[in-house]
Amino acid sequence: MKDQLKTKLFSWYLAKYVAKDVLFSFITGTTLFLLIMLMFQAIRLSDFIVVHQVSIQDVGRISLSLMLSFLPIAIPVAFLFAVLMGVSRANSEGEIVALQANGISLIQIFLPIGAFSVFVSLVCLYASLYTVPQGNRNFELLITKLSNERALAMLKPGVFTEGFFGLVLFAETIIPVKNEMKRIFIYDQRDENHPLAITADAGILRHLPEQGRITLRLSSGTIHVDNKKDLKVLQKVDFDVYDINLDLGAAGNSWRDYSPQSYTLPQLKAKLIEIANDIPSFRQLQVEYHRRFSLSFSCIVFAMLGFSIGIWSQRGVRSSAVLLCLVVGLCYWLSYVAANALASTGWVIPWVGIWVPNFLFAGIAYLSYRRHA
């Protein structure tokens, strides 16, 4: 009697059986979806290599940071794929019917999957609150640093560029591979009392990471110094070589403001308190806060959905599990994006808008299960 009660409540043998079917597909699916998402960034990564002349090592670091930022999306979809594959295989081969014939209910079969989904959700939540924001922050700083180091790639020949390290710069010819420019005009207003207008025949950018700066070395040119305090005084200086130091920050690590995705949980809470009076920004951070929890616990929703779809059909689901997974994932993502937009614009309360897709798909999973039962 005791063994029968234990079998009714929980079976470690059944748990191991389900884990063996789901775990491998989950790991494979996570890897697959991360690589698919990374492929969509292939053009961007190739741009870093070809245009910015970034090393393969730095591209690898960028790729790892991107894959880390994709985890909160890839893990739930991969878990849906794993559950759908495992349950549909067992159902198509008659194992679900055999288990039911031996007195094991569908709820008991789902119990190990549900427990695993809770564990995966907690892992995903920790990653979303701490690991992924740190990866996003490292990615932002790395991109800013590389952009500064390869600053010449931002320039276009024959076009005035504002905001080039605080300068207005024009170059008739640009040679990115050699970091060289020809026939240059620069307006330097960093010192408001003594703005400079500089012309030069040529220039070259020299990166000095140990000193935390870039040096723009100009040759064969003229400097016109405008003295704002004395309008009658205008100095002209000819030079053979003139260096302009462009500050990158300490040790070449350029700073940029945090994006909402880069705040860890303590930083996010502190920022919410800090900008409580700024309604639009406060709403955006609230959306980001609830988004992390909602995406993490979507693993439980996808476990329910994958199980309910998997027990529907007798055959055929296994062969099209990937397609079904992508369709369900796409429908969820579209509803999530729509709800996110409504929450961000203030049409609905942030937590309501962000959590609606989870409740909606959980309801669909429950109705599907009830219909089969």
Image: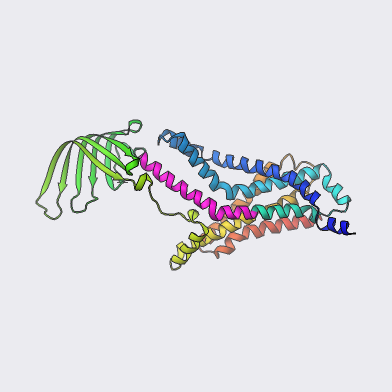
Q: Which residues are magenta?
A: 121-150
The answer to whether 214 is drawn above or below residue 296 in the figure is above
Q: Residue at x 39, y 42 (%)?
A: 147
Q: Residue 148 appears in which quarter of the rendering? A: top left
Residue 321 coordinates in the image, percent (x, y): 71, 43
Residue 170 position (above or below residue 109):
above
Left or right of 13? Residue 151 is left
Q: Is residue 149 magenta?
A: yes
| Residue 304 visible in the displayed image | no
Q: Is residue 148 rendered to the left or right of residue 329?
A: left
Residue 297 position in % (x across, y down): 64, 56
Q: Residue at x 46, y 67 (%)?
A: 276
Quarter of the picture containing the N terminus is bottom right
- As drawn, the residue found furthest toward the bottom would be 277
Magenta stretch: dominant secondary structure: helix
Instruction: Give the camera-side residue of 345 and 258.
Output: 258
Drawn side of residue 75 relative to residue 156, left or right: right
Question: Residue at the right extreme?
Answer: 1
Task: Tell me residue 326's x, y (percent).
Answer: 65, 45
Is 115 colored magenta in this rendering?
no
**Relative to residue 198, is residue 10 depicted above or below?**
below
Which sits in the foreground, 17 or 148? Answer: 17
The residue lying furthest to the left in this view is 232
| Residue found at x 66% / y 40% | 28
* Horizontal and vertical percent position of residue 209: 35, 41
- Asked if residue 36 can be seen in this view, the reply is yes
Q: Quadrant of residue 129?
A: bottom right
**Quarter of the C terminus within the rendering:** bottom right
